[in-house]
Amino acid sequence: MIWGGLLIFWNLRRAAGRETTGVDDHFEILDRDGFLEVRVSGPYSLLQFKNQMLTGVLAMKERRKRHLLLDVRGLVGTPSTLDRHDLGRSGVENKVDFKVAALVTPEQAKDNFASTVARNRGVNVQTFTDRDQALAWLLGKSDAPP
């Protein structure tokens, strides 16, 4: 866990003051009007993805944002069922207390297990395959989930 903490600290230092520069080749934080956008791409790894998400959560809290667009359409590989359960639980562990719209590919949206686990634990998250629908829900222009 020490290495994970150091990685997060390093990522935050590298991202400090940069609005559109990613913290690594497969992670980008974009400060948008009314929300923060986090883009994740590249090969899937549970540890790397959890560190990226924690970095995104810390950026949300640091910038006092209440809405997160999480774009994972660029991820390559499929998390196992156990990984998806773990990812859903991590929203609670990371104290996610803001609204999250997850933007996924149709293949990634097959069962939405991670978001279901997170919602069952109190995280306000919905999964979308369409960016416009995700933003409408995220910014309060639509209450209906996809």
Image (cartoon, grey):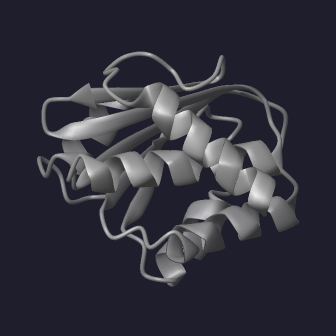
Left or right for 64, reference 25? left
Q: Residue 41: x percent and y percent?
A: 66, 25
> How many discs mark residues in the rendered view?
0
Please tell me whether residue 9 is drawn above or below residue 31 in the rendered image. Answer: below
Residue closest to the eye, 58 or 146: 58
Left or right for 141, reference 107? left
The quarter in which the N terminus is drawn is bottom right
Residue 78 visible in the snapshot = yes
Left or right for 72, reference 75? left
Q: Quadrant of residue 31?
A: top left
Left or right for 122, reference 30? right
- The residue lying at 76 percent from left, 60 percent from top is 2
Residue 146 visible in the snapshot = no
Please tell me whether residue 23 is drawn above or below residue 102 in the rendered image. Answer: above
Please tell me whether residue 91 is drawn above or below residue 129 in the rendered image. Answer: below
Residue closest to the eye, 91 or 142: 91
Q: Residue 112: x percent and y percent?
A: 62, 57
Residue closest to the eye, 16 or 131: 16
Q: Quadrant of residue 130?
A: top left
Please tell me whether residue 87 is drawn above or below residue 138 in the rendered image. Answer: below
Residue closest to the eye, 52 or 112: 52
- The residue lying at 31 percent from left, 56 percent from top is 61
Q: Residue 22: x percent and y percent?
A: 51, 21
- The residue lying at 50 percent from left, 27 percent from top is 14
- The residue lying at 48 percent from left, 74 percent from top is 119
Q: Residue 107: x percent and y percent?
A: 71, 36
